[in-house]
Structure formats: structure tokens, C-alpha cells
Image (cartoon, rainbow, N blue to C red):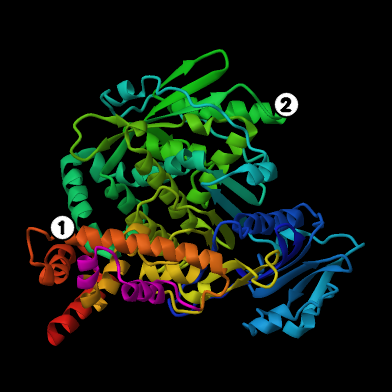
Amino acid sequence: MKLRYFRLRDKAPHTDTKIIFGREELLGLTGSLHFLVGINGTGKSRLLQTLVETLMHLENNQEPSYTVTLAYDLPHPETQAPRTILFHTSKTEAGLYEFKDVVPDPDDDLWESLENEAGILEPNLLGENTRFWERGKQWASMSVYLPQSVLVYTSGAIGNWEQMFAPQHINESENDGLVLEATREYEVSLDQTQATLPDNVNSFPMTVWVRGEDYRAALLVAVLATASQEFEGVLRFHTTAFEEERRRYRKIGRAMPERFDEHFRSILDEIGWLYPITTSLTFTEQDTETTQNTDENKDAIQNSLRSIASSSRSTPNTETLHFDLRRQLPVHADDGIHVHAETVATLLLRDLTRSQKGDNFTAFEGLRQILYWQRKGYLKTEDIRIVLRKLDVPDPIPLESLSDGERMFLGRMALMSLIGDTKNTLVILDEPETHFNDYWKREMVDIVDRTLETQNTDVLITTHSSIALTDAFSREINRLFRSKRDPQLIKADHPRDPTFGATPTEVLQEIFEGPRAVGQRAAEFLDTLLVMLSYPKEVLNSWEQKQPTQILKNAMYAELLPIEEIPWTEVERQKAKVQLDKKLEQTLQTIFDYGNDKYPVSERLVGVVKNNLMPKVGAGYYRFEFSRRLMLLESTS
């Protein structure tokens, strides 16, 4: 799926907001990456929610009550022929249009001229199309015209999302002796049989919502997928060699970007994760549906998992199953006679994802199944427990022993690595970088980008991270802002200046309207010193008079209160001048006192700046500008 155009009206706070989703062909990606940015209060999350809500309305054969136009490209599920789908609904008309081919990228003005102020749509401007649904007539089968799935992840406020999806909230429990289970010796066992799960009884809804606290589900699927590969070979019989290999990769990983083709394994290496030893799943007796069919499937699920569990503990309302992932169990071949051994990690992954041997299993569908069980009340995802081995840590440790940041990093990166298994999917990531350090923010974009190399998937991310946007082309960034003429109107555009490979400070000022490229504390002090270096004689006069001269004050006003700031009233400007006067006076006194026993008065300003301040100023504008002004002073002295 590729988003093309989205126009939302009459749904607060968006009275008329238009998004034109640009695509950058230069990197040769099959999928597309988009960013939705803007300062707080511009309705980023609300816009995402309405986009998802619109697709959910279509899935459920419902017409939205608000005015919306949505265009996207989607291959036909049977012929795989690419074409553009356009949905429009307003007070005056509604329709769903299928274009014969993919609409070539029109000018932005053409997208915006598709509909007039009365809400009348003119799709023929984009090319030949068929209108197969209109208001008052029966809906067509919508699955042909919708993405295969919509994945939504949010790490921020969930209030509005919760109303859309109505998830169940379940409290966490303790580890229940799982560390003890991890210390037990493992062995190959061929005296157990594996139960067979029934076919899926319910088709999943198109949209999957992953809450911040659901990170354990994504992590479990990604960890099991990795362990099922590693346990089958070198890990079971050459653990020492495996540890040395992981230690080596951890050291060279940042210096060898291509190694990150391993995707999630490289993320595990980042925190020194070797492998999981045990895991536990907690089921509940509570059922959101009481049909006999649902009860039978729940029993079948638990019976199958029970057959491969290392131990179990029952309570009146819950049952927790522990799994020793290092063990092997017998699996019968299709002929029912031959038996071979597979690890518990592999069998558990297969059962959790309802994927029997020979199925076209994808890890994303596994996550989808687990979250489906969680919503149905079968499984408590908050109580998923994992005990692991970590580099240079002698004893097994529970997942909870990792820092909050490490757990969040692993869970979100696991989710993003699973995106690589999706096709014709829309992925919504609402502020996924929350609580990440700058390096991990860069890793986040890189992981997503690599999943788009071969998959026809669109990823739409909201972010407040300047450093993440340095990985994006301007055409991939949609900036929301309030109109200066009408503050009630939220508009959207692409950044004017290129962002790909730019420094985060440039992005901060261009997109997030940051008044300065560095912190306020540093900027105030350094800006004042730059003015003082431009007027060294006035600095000496000020020290002699024990107060700033008017010439030096006027220089501060000219440098830091530019005249183009017309919106300031005269009263506000006078208050700003008083603050600048105070800052100037403080800085003059600070430099004078600091250099009192180091330099004579005539050399004090230059001496303090050159010898004491410059070694402490980071690379960038200020270091360059101080060097330039010091050189000018030395050449004229």
C-alpha cells in the first residue's frame, strides 16, 4: 500500500487539512516512509486516528460522518495489477473509485483541485476510473480495495486510540520462579507428543493496535523467531563459540552497517543479549465471548501449549505455563511414522502463531494472533515473562532486570523488525522514539528503512525527534502548522530546505520552529560574548565605568532583537531590553572576575575566551564564530 492523498474537513481540530504524501525514488525502496511532524497542538495524532478510523469504516461497510478524501495505491489481490483507489465522502456526495492503473504523480495543485468548496469530487482529472459504490447503494466487497492489514503502535497518550479499539487492561504479576526454571539442566526428550491446533475460527480484523505495554508480545515473537534459528544449530552445541561471536559482533556492529541486515539479531547484540532460556505465558479463565466454539478453541490452544510446557502452575483463575526453550521434543512427519526432534522455541512459536508445518508463516501474523488472543481475554500479554543469558553476566536474569530504556528499545525494535514480514500494509507509528537516546533514534529509522527495501508497505511516523528526520527527504516529511491568517486552520506542507543528511540543529529550526540551534543556557551566554568580542573597547570602558556603556547595549539590541520582529509591542520590546541589559551586566562581571588573577585588564576578554572558554565549546556555529572574531581582533591589534 502507498498513501497518496488525504484531506480531512469538519473534524476538530482539522477544519480543512490536506496531506500530499510524497515518495522519494532515489533510494530504490519498494515501500515508502513518511513522517508527520509539527509542534504540539497541531493535531498530528488526531490526524492519524482519523486516517485509521476511515479505513475501519470502509472495512465495516460504514460511511464516515465527516468529510474526507483518501487516495492510495494497492495491488489487486488476485491479479497483483497495481492501481489507485480513491474514497471520498462529503455532505453532498460520496463514492469509491478504482482507477485503471496507478495514477502518475500529479502536481500538488491538481490533488487539491480534485474537490471544490461544495465538496464535489472530480476524479476524472486523475485519469480513467470506475465508480463502484455511491451513497444510497449497496456496498461492494471491500477487501479487494483495502490494505491487507493496518498496524498501529503508540507510545504516548492512548485515550482516543482506546476508544477506537476498546482494549482490555490486565495487571502484571510476578515472575513466579521463572529464574529457577532457567537454571535447570535441559535434555533431549522423545517421550512426549504434540497436540494439533484446530484451524483458525475467526478472521482477524484488518487493524491491529499495539499499545506501549504490549511490547512484550512483539518481543516474544521476535525472540522466539531468532532462537528457533540459533537453537537448531551452533547455540545448542557450541555455546562458548557463539558467545565469542556475539561479543565480536557487538564490538564491530556500529562500524559495519551492512551487518544490520540481520535485523533483530543486531538489536539484541546492542544490549548484549545472548539467548532466551525460559519463558512463561499466563492464560485466564475469563472469556469475552461465551460461545461453545470459542471455549473449544481456547481449550485446544492451552492443551497444545501444555504438551510442550516444561511445567505448569494452576490457580483458581489463571494458568501459567513455563517453557524451557533449550529442550527438544519429538515431531511426527507427515507419514505419521518418522519422528524428528525440534526445539521448544520452534514448537512454541509455531503454536502461538497457529502456524502448522508447511504454512506460509510470518512473524507479523504471529504477533497479530497473540494480540488477538489478548483482546479476546485468552492470554495476558502483560504477564509474558522471559529469562535470558546476557554477555559477561554469569547467571540467568529476568527481562525485568534490564533497564526501562533497554526493554522499551527491544520491544519497539522487535515490532519494527516484524514489519518486514508484511505486504500491502499500512504501518502507523505514533511517536515510537519516546524514551530513546539519540543513537537508538537513528537505529529506529534504519530498521524501518531496511524493512521497506522489498515490501510494498507504507510506514507513517509521527515524531518530535530532529535527529530522526535527518534520515528523511523533505518530500517524505509532512509538516503541520497553524495558519498565520487563520489560527484555527491547520495546514500542511513539506519543508522548504533539504533535510536528508542535514544536521539536527537545522531540522530543529526549520521544522519545529526552534528559535535557537543550541540550548537556551549556552546560547544566551555565548551570544553575549560574541557581541563583547565585536566591541572590545566598549568592554574596557564598561569595566572602567562599572556598568555597560550605551554603545554596548545598543549592539546587544541590534544583534539579539532584530527589527523584523514586528509582532512585539513596544512594552514587550522594552522588557526584553531590560533582560538583555541584565545579561550583559552579569557576563561583563563574570569575565572580569574569572580572569582577575590570570590576565591584565587589557587582555582579559580575549584571554578568557581563547584560553578558557574555547576548549569547552562544542563543534558548530559558536566555535567557528569565536575563532573568526578572535582572528579579526588579532589582525587589527
Q: How packed is label 1: few (under 14 Cα within 10 Å), some, or many (20 or more)?
A: some
Bounds of the magenta segment: 540-563
Residue 618 location (% of width, % of height) = 23, 65
Residue 304 location (% of width, % of height) = 51, 29
Query: Quadrant location of the N terminus?
Result: bottom right
Does the magenta segment cover residue 553? Answer: yes
- At horizontal 31% and vertical 43% (from top left) the residue drawn is 232
Q: Which of 280 and 330 is in front in this view?
A: 280
Instruction: Answer whether residue 107 is visible to the viewer in this image.
Output: yes
Which SS does the magenta portion mostly show?
A: helix
Instruction: Answer whether residue 100 is visible to the viewer in this image.
Output: no
- Tell me the quarter of the picture where residue 289 sits: top right
Upstream in sequence: badge 1 or badge 2: 2
For badge 2, the amino acid type reads: Thr
- Tell me the quarter of the picture where residue 403 sits: top left
Looking at this view, name the residue that lies furthest to the right: 136
Residue at mark 1 to residue at mark 2: CA–CA distance: 78 Å
Q: How packed is label 2: few (under 14 Cα within 10 Å), some, or many (20 or more)?
A: few
For badge 1, the amino acid type reads: Tyr
Disc number at residue 594? 1
The residue indicated by pointer 2 is 290
Query: Quadrant location of the C terminus?
Result: bottom left
Q: Which of 132 and 347 is in front in this view?
A: 132
- At horizontal 47% and vertical 67% (from top left) the residue drawn is 454
- At horizontal 12% and vertical 67% (from top left) the residue drawn is 601
